[in-house]
């Protein structure tokens, strides 16, 4: 397993980028955690529907996005808000989506991020389609698709990996192996010793990295992105991390896992190790920490306000997004509905 | 002596009975073991029967259903769970092209006695990919039987009936029914179940119109019938219970008595089970007894919205059934 930054902040080998970028990405991880904790809190207040927390997976997501170009596709899941945000998806739309507002699934035009997939694994297949189309069209855009350890058991994983390799498309498969698929632990999900080794059978490189290590994740994704962009085909990256929270707000992990395990992983926190590293390089102090925490809080509060102040959708709009052009029978239904409610 | 229990508990009791009665029975599905299933239906069964027979699986719907097909062919009696009925989309090949067809393709030499349980339906805020009512898909495939119990007693009895059936049965449970309560007489052997797949049940007698419902719409139809009664309208409520095979004779007999037909289901109206019920009535002499055009009160044909208000708006509610029934009677 590749590692560049140990849990205690020690550097292994060389840092993949400078202190300035490290500070920027540290700040991004602080923002992500602020969003995530706020998401859990808002759900408890009844202001969001079901919420799937990603606490503990910030380095895997922020590190991966940092290695992409701004117009690379990101096709991710319900647990990937930090990844999506880092590729341009606004916090307010991420919140709006979780309140049940379908407009949350509609990113600004220039943002190359698909709305989160709620079913497990299905999105990997169309990520390959995106990457394939970019290749056919001769662009240098690539696609990164993110999924969990559980998704590797779906048939979609096999078919997506196989197509991507056979057609040598520029698709990065980022598996955030967070140890648990709801109640099923990783070792009962697959008999493979690692998820990365599954790549061998498909004829693509597989890399296992410490998923809580910002540097290692960045480096692996950068290597995969460079290969993909230069026509070298897909890569499978297994980022070994941990789902510190429940599967979603509908879940109680105490029913199936030992709290000691959660404690142990808290000591391998992805943000703390970067803090120590920055601190040792004289690039972190309490004052800056307080400042970025305040900025994060303000930014997230602003996003919530924006999401909650979106004018409610009218009843007729429920039909508007079904087809590109509303067929006559639905047009008639829409008229009837709006008039009937007037 | 019946006892009051929830739909989920009555269903669990049926699985417990089958696991106790027949060692060929096993359960498999995602998070059905120590977690007890996404809706707690299998809660405690792994402790009673062990991990071999209450099997947590990787996230592999196709493999779960394929496993059941293979096991059923050897004579085992698999009862497998799709965590949400929507996920059966991943398992359509083993279900539709294998389970439903193997008996036919092997000239009757192979039977596939398996049950695929799947929670469906909306109203839980679970949005477009976790809220569908897909019974029409399965009902359209020759070789599958499709059961949608509405009450705790029926979910108990019909699971036992599904076990006794030597064919693949798709057993669809509405998520909002799991916590509903009712009197249940627990059977001590599967063979004691009085329920038969393909038999509807008249739950309320009436003279003014027939309401044919199933699954979550059955309790809603009964509630609507109470409201109608206070307006002087006596509705006869039929719980179809299974939609493949469909007990059209019970509906026809009722229509001959009442002269009016309203069909209701949560699944989208176009090409739904309701259309089949209406056609079945029109293809018989019951047509001559109709005093008014038939009515359907069904789900709106849109992906299930995440927003609570919109979700409620696209799912037929008690008041929708009541209003449509009044219109029908007063037409």
Image (cartoon, coloured by chain):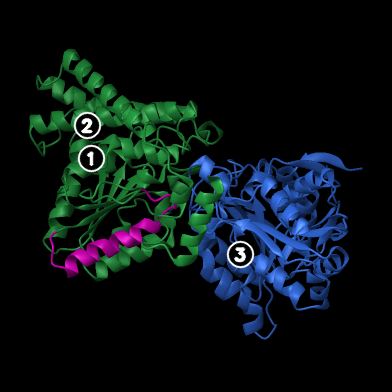
Crowding around mark 3 (Cα neighbors within 10 Å: few <14, some 14 to 19, many 20+) is many
The residue at 54%/36% (across/down) is A256
Looking at the picture, does residue B261 appear above or below residue A5? below
The image shows residue A44 at horizontal and vertical percentages of 49, 27
Q: Which range of residues does the magenta coloring cover?
A: A116-140
Residue displayed at 76% across by 61% down: B240
Classify 10 Å Cα crowding around label 1: few (below 14), some (14-19), many (20 and above). Answer: many
Which mark is first along the chain, 2 or 1?
2
Q: Check the rendered structure and report the hue given to chain A.
A: green
Number of callouts: 3
Q: Quadrant of residue B133?
A: bottom right
Per the rendering, the colour in which chain B appears is blue
**Secondary structure found at label 1:** helix
Relative to residue B228, is residue B117 depicted above or below? below
Q: Are marks 1 and 2 in contact (CB under 8 Å)?
A: yes
Mark 2 crowdedness (10 Å alpha carbons): few <14, some 14-19, many ≥20: many
Query: In this rendering, would B199 be left or right of A32?
Result: right
At a point 43% along the width and 63% down the height, the residue shown is: A155
- Closer mark to the observer between disc 1 and disc 3: 1
Question: x, y (%) of residue A101?
Answer: 42, 42
* Residue tagged 3: B68
Q: Dividing the picture into quarters, in which one does residue B28 lie?
A: bottom right
């Amino acid at each position: 397993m590749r590692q560049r930054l140990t849990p205690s902040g020690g550097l292994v080998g060389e840092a993949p980028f400078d202190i300035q970028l490290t500070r920027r990405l540290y700040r991004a991880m602080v923002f992500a955690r602020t969003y995530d904790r706020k998401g859990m809190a808002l759900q408890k207040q009844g202001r969001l529907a079901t919420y799937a927390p990603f606490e503990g997976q910030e380095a895997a997501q922020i590190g991966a996005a940092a290695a992409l170009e701004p117009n690379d596709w990101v096709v991710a899941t319900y647990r990937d808000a930090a990844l999506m945000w880092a590729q341009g998806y606004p916090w307010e739309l991420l919140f709006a989506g979780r309140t049940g507002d379908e407009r949350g699934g509609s990113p600004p035009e220039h943002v190359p991020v698909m709305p989160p997939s709620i079913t497990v694994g299905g999105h990997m297949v169309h990520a390959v389609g995106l990457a394939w189309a970019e290749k056919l069209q001769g662009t240098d855009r690539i696609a990164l698709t993110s999924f969990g350890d559980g998704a590797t058991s779906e048939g979609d994983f096999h078919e997506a990996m196989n197509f991507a390799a056979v057609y040598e498309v520029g698709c990065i498969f980022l598996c955030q192996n967070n140890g648990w698929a709801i109640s099923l632990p990783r070792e009962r999900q697959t008999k493979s010793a690692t998820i990365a080794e599954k790549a061998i059978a498909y004829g693509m490189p597989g890399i296992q990295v410490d998923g809580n290590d910002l540097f290692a994740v960045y480096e692996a994704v950068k290597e995969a992105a460079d290969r993909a962009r230069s026509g070298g085909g897909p890569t499978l990256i297994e980022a070994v991390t941990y789902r510190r929270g429940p599967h979603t707000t509908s879940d109680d992990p105490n029913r199936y896992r030992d709290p000691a395990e959660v404690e142990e992983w808290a000591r391998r926190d992805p943000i703390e190790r970067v803090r120590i590293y920055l601190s040792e390089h004289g690039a972190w102090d309490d004052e800056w920490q307080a400042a970025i925490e305040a900025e994060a809080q303000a930014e997230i509060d602003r996003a919530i306000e924006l999401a909650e102040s979106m004018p409610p959708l009218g009843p007729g709009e429920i039909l508007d997004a079904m087809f590109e052009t509303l067929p006559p029978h639905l047009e008639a239904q829409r008229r009837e509905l709006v008039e009937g409610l007037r | 002596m019946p006892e009051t229990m929830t739909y989920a508990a009555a269903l669990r009791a049926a699985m417990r009975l089958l696991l106790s009665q027949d060692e060929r029975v096993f359960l498999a599905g995602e998070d059905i073991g120590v977690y007890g299933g996404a809706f707690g239906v299998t809660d405690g069964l792994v402790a009673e029967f062990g991990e071999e027979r209450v099997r947590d699986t990787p996230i592999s719907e196709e493999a779960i259903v394929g496993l059941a097909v293979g096991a059923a062919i050897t004579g085992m009696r698999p009862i497998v769970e799709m965590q949400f009925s929507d996920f059966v989309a991943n398992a359509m090949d083993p279900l539709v092209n294998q389970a439903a067809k193997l008996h036919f393709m092997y000239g009757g030499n192979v039977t596939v006695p398996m049950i695929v349980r799947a929670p469906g339906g909306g109203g839980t805020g679970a949005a477009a990919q976790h809220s569908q009512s897909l019974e029409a898909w399965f009902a359209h495939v020759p070789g599958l039987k499709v059961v949608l119990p509405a009450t705790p007693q029926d979910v108990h009895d019909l699971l036992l009936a599904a076990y006794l059936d030597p064919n693949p049965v798709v057993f669809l449970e509405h998520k909002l029914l799991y916590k509903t309560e009712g009197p249940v007489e627990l059977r001590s052997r599967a063979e004691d179940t009085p329920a038969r797949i393909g038999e509807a049940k008249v739950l309320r007698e009436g003279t003014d119109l027939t309401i044919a419902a199933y699954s979550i719409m059955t309790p809603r139809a009964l509630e609507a019938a109470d409201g109608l009664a206070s307006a002087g309208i006596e509705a006869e409520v039929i719980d179809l219970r299974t939609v493949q095979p469909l007990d059209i004779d019970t509906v026809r007999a009722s229509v001959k008595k009442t002269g009016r037909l309203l069909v209701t289901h949560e699944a989208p109206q176009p090409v739904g089970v309701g259309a089949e019920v209406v056609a079945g009535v029109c293809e018989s002499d019951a047509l001559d007894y109709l005093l008014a055009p038939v009515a359907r009160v069904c789900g709106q044909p849109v992906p299930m919205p995440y927003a609570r208000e919109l979700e409620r708006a696209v799912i037929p509610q008690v008041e929708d059934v009541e209003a449509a029934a009044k219109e029908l009677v007063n037409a």
